[in-house]
């Protein structure tokens, strides 16, 4: 039986997710399968045997804690859960140094510091569940354990907000809290701010979902709770969130899906948590009906995917269970970070969010240039297709598969992206939407960071160096269903090059293989029930082929095919231009006409002209100079 069939039998699959009551029921449906997995003393939640970078005991405390992101709003809005008896016992024992399930001393950079934030939310939203039932001695132990965060060092990124959340919880309970350290952390977070509502996750860090589901999320909670005491900062957080929303809405499709990009994608429907907290904080940058629609359609989309274990537990992965794409810090309970999206349950039934009619996305432009995250978002409304064209970033990090998650040329909500399974060859590397280079040993290098880049209206230019003596200049002419890449490769080495298109799922929703393949002179096309993906060599030497990567490399589909242009290059300067075709959807015959309308790249009078739809719309002038003009 396929995972898809198992998921379809779960109660949540039939939840219409149209009303507040439906969302309350969804929370209970997601929590019910967890009951057998709590420890004897209830302070740990062990959901699997896979490991992460922290200890097993800490991972089980993580699982216990993350459920509170949804339980606390449910309780605040008047909803009940059978889990609260478990949580009261678990909190008593987890904070008791004399109990076998004591959560222990917290160290600097400890994962437990991350998990304390959900208790900050619970202290404020559900004190009658997590605080008031405790005895005076139990309250003292509770405070002492969580107060450890005020004496610990955290990573210089979104982690700074965890201390803020715990101290806000203390303040709500009337307990002593460290306002001075709160202010110091908030001042440091302000240094991560870029422009147009965007934060990087630390100085020089990436712009990804940690902006919306972490920094903005906590900032808007702060704004709501501290609006009278700290009105200036509260207003600033709301102003920045409103500006960010106007860009971030382009990351969501009409069918509820969102753009898979960056790390921590196993948190899945936390992608919409920003819209939940925006409504909670009363920032109506879009009508409440629009925000409600984004949240509810997003949940519906996710609950239709095979993301559950057979008994209803969330798995590690993205659109299906997948450890290959996971982070080192992803433990079995990590996916429950996604419960952040249930924050609107704290809003009463009469709140405008719940009273509003669910609305579709507003009318959006076909293209959004987003300078801070180094992206151009291209939308195909008819097929609910979103593509983020990426310039790359000036720095990198040591997280898992960083190059695949942040440095590919294009990220799609319908084709996803792929991560390497191993290091040898094109099949193990799964090099979709990237140029991979090898010295003939089948060990490939890709762009890990950008030396420099520029983003114009429809054109991205990036310079990157896979070796110290190899420089690649890449121009992306963005578009859909076609986009064009032009590479200038200057190398003192013999190189094998592989420029990959979109990865296409080869099976339909029932697991039946539906792939059709075709190749002609300079082109390769794959068509399946998932749509069509193709590539054409527009300039330079080489040939087109269809690469069948290892299973479980793509975040959307377990088995894929990647149209790829390959070439062997002598030392010197080489130019390669490719046309990349991607047409998602179930109607396979729709691609024929589009595929035949391939772009052209022609060298004319010392300049490269890019022809799309028969018209020359871009020109690369002064060959070798870093400029493309419309």
Image: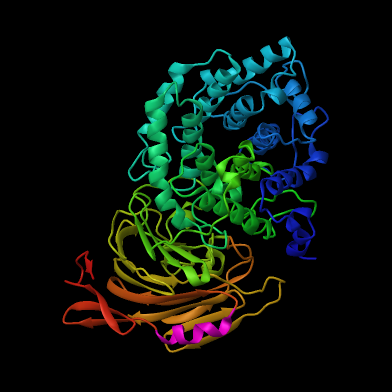
- Quadrant where the N terminus sits is bottom right
Q: Vertically, is 608 above or below 430? A: below
- In percent of width and height, residue 341 lies at 59, 44
Q: Report whether residue 142 is seen.
A: yes
119 lies above or below 238:
above
Where residue 176 sits, quadrant-wise, is top right
Q: Is residue 9 left or right of residue 184?
A: right
Residue at position x 66%, y 74% in the image: 507
Looking at the image, is 122 positioned above or below residue 566?
A: above
| Nearer to us in this view, 24 or 420 | 24
Magenta stretch holds residue 319: no
In the image: residue 132, left or right of residue 291: right
Quadrant of the image occupied by residue 406 = bottom left
Region of the chain picked out in magenta, as a range: 587-597
Where in the figure is residue 320, as x and y percent of width and height? 66, 59
Which part of the image, by quadrant, shows the C terminus? bottom left
Answer whether residue 148 is visible to the viewer in this image.
no
Number of marks present in the image shown: 0
Our reading of the magenta stretch's main secondary structure is: helix
Give how far across and how far down residue 437 sits, in percent.
41, 66
| Residue 620 left/right relative to 15 | left
Return the residue nearer the eye: 76 or 210: 76
Residue that lies at the very extreme toward the bottom in this rendered image:
520
Which residue is found at the position 40% from the left and 22% from the top?
A: 184
């Amino acid at each position: 039986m396929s995972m898809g069939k198992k998921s379809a039998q779960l109660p949540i699959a039939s939840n219409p997710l149209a009303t507040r009551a439906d969302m309350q029921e969804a929370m209970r449906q997601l929590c019910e399968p967890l009951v057998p997995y709590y420890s004897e003393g209830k302070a740990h939640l062990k959901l699997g045997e896979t490991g992460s970078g922290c200890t097993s005991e800490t991972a089980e405390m993580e699982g216990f804690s993350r459920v509170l992101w949804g339980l606390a709003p449910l309780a605040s809005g008047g909803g009940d859960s059978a889990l609260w008896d478990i949580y009261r016992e678990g909190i008593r024992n987890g904070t008791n140094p004399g109990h076998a399930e004591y959560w222990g001393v917290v160290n600097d950079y400890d994962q437990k510091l991350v998990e304390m934030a959900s208790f900050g939310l619970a202290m404020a939203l559900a004190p009658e569940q997590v605080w008031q039932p405790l005895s005076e001695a139990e309250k003292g132990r509770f405070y002492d354990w969580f107060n450890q965060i005020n004496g610990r060092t955290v990573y210089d990124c979104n982690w700074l907000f965890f201390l803020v959340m715990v101290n806000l919880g203390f303040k709500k309970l009337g307990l002593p809290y460290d306002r001075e350290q709160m202010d110091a952390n908030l001042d440091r977070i302000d240094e991560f701010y870029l422009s147009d509502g965007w934060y990087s996750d630390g100085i020089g860090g990436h712009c990804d979902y940690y902006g919306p589901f972490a920094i903005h999320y906590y900032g808007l909670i702060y704004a709501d709770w501290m609006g009278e005491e700290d009105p200036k900062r509260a207003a600033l957080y709301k102003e920045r969130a409103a500006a960010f929303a106007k860009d971030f809405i382009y990351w969501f499709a009409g069918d509820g899906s969102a753009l898979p990009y960056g790390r921590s994608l196993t948190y899945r429907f936390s992608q919409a948590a920003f819209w939940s907290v925006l409504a909670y904080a009363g920032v109506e940058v879009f009508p409440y009906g629009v925000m409600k629609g984004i949240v509810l359609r997003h949940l519906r989309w996710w609950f239709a995917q095979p993301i559950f274990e057979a008994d209803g537990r969330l798995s590690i992965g993205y659109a299906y269970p997948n450890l290959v794409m996971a982070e080192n810090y992803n433990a079995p309970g990590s996916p429950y970070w996604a419960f952040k999206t249930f924050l609107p349950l704290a809003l009463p039934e009469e709140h405008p969010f719940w009273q509003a009619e669910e609305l579709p996305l507003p009318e959006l432009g076909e293209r959004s240039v987003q300078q801070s995250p180094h992206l151009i978002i291209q939308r195909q409304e008819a097929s609910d297709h979103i593509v983020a064209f990426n310039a790359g970033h000036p720095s990198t990090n040591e997280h898992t598969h960083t190059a695949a998650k942040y440095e590919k040329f294009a990220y799609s909500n319908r084709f996803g992206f792929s991560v390497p399974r191993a290091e040898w060859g094109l099949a193990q590397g799964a090099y979709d939407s990237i140029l991979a280079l090898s010295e003939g040993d089948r060990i490939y290098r890709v762009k890990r960071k950008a030396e420099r880049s520029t983003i114009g209206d429809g054109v991205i230019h990036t310079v990157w160096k896979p070796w110290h003596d190899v420089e690649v200049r890449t121009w992306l002419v963005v578009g859909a269903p076609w986009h064009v890449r032009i590479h200038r490769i200057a190398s003192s080495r013999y190189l094998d090059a592989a420029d990959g298109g979109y990865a296409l799922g080869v099976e339909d929703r029932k697991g039946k293989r539906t792939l059709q393949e075709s190749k002609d002179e300079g082109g390769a096309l794959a068509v399946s029930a998932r749509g069509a993906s193709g590539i054409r060599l527009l300039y330079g030497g080489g040939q087109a082929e269809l690469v069948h990567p290892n299973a479980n490399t793509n975040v959307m589909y377990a088995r894929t095919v990647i149209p790829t242009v390959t070439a062997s290059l002598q030392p010197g300067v080489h130019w390669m231009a490719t046309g990349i075709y991607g047409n998602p959807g179930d109607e396979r015959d729709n691609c024929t006409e589009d595929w035949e309308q391939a772009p052209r790249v022609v060298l004319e009078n010392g300049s490269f002209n890019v022809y799309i739809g028969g018209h020359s719309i871009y020109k690369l002038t002064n060959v070798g100079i870093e400029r493309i003009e419309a």
